[in-house]
Image (tube, rainbow, N blue to C red):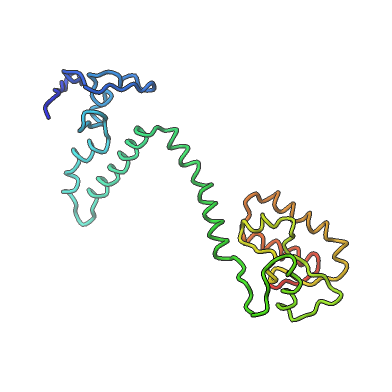
Amino acid sequence: MQSRYYDPVTHRFINADSYASTNPTDAISCNMFAYCGNNPVNLFDPSGFAGEAISGWAGTMWWLLCIDGPIPVGDIIYGAGCLVCGIVDLVDYVGIDTIVQLFSSIPDVAASLIRQLDAAINASPPPDGPNFKKYTSRNFRYNLQQLTGESGDGMQAHHVFPQRFVNDFKNIGIEIHNPINGTWVDASHQSWSAAYNQAWANFFSANTNPTYSQAIAYARVLAREYGFTLNF
C-alpha cells in the first residue's frame, strides 16, 4: 500500500514499522526499521509484519515452471524449494522446540493407534451358539462346557489369560472370560498356577505396551510349557 519505503542499500525501511516485535530470542526483530531480520535475500515480507521464505521463493523462482523439457525438472525444483521454505517458515513461526516436541510424540501416538487397530482387528469374537451366557467369571465353566461339548467332570476350567491381569488384557482387546480363551486342566493345575501367573507378570513387565498378537503368541508358548490345549 506504499505506506513504507525500503532502502536496498542499507537493507532498512526508511520509516518505522507500525508493529514492533518483542521476541527475546531474536533481538533484530525489535528493530522497527529492519526488513526480514536483515535477510532480504532469503526472506520476503508481503504483509510488512513477518518475513516468509516461501513467499520470496514462490515470487522470484516462478520461472522454473517455464523451463520444463521431457522431464519436469523445473517443477520438481520449484516444488522442493516451496517445501523447504514452508518448513523454514513453520519453524520460525512456532519455534524449533515445538517442532521437536511434536516429532518426538509421533512414535507414542503411532504405537497407541497400532495397538488399538490391532485389538480391533484381532479381538476374539464371541463363539457362535445359542447357549452361551454372559462372559463373566461365574459363567466361565458353563460357557466352556458349551464350547467344547465336554462336561469337564474332574477337570478345572482354566483361564488361559489369568484373571489377575483382566484389565491389562482388556486394554489389548482380549476378553479373558470368553470361553475360547479357556481350556480344561486336571488337578495338577494347583501346583503350577502360581508360576503360571508369575510368567504373565514377567510378560507385562517386559512388554509395557504389548499387542494382541504378542499376548496370543506368549499364550501358545505357555500352553506348550504347561501341557494344555488351546481353543484358538
- Residue at 16% in and 44% down: 63
Residue 25, position in %: x, y?
A: 39, 22
The total of numbered circles placed on residues is 0
The location of residue 159, given as percent across then percent down, is 75, 65
Image quadrant containing the N terminus: top left
Looking at the image, is 78 positioned above or below residue 173? above
User: Relative to residue 149, is residue 196 depicted above or below?
Assistant: above
| Residue 163 in the figure: left or right of residue 128 | right
Which residue lies at the image location 79% right of the left edge and 54% below the top edge? 198
Quarter of the figure with residue 195 = bottom right
Toward which corner of the image does residue 170 lie, by quadrant? Answer: bottom right
Residue at the far left in the pictured view: 2
When the figure is inspected, residue 181 is found, relative to residue 153, above or below; the finding is: above
Q: Nearer the viewer, residue 224 or 162?
A: 162
Name the residue at 55% across, 65% down.
121
Camera-side residue of 12 and 129: 129
Image quadrant containing the C terminus: bottom right
Of 46 and 159, which appears nearest the observer?
159
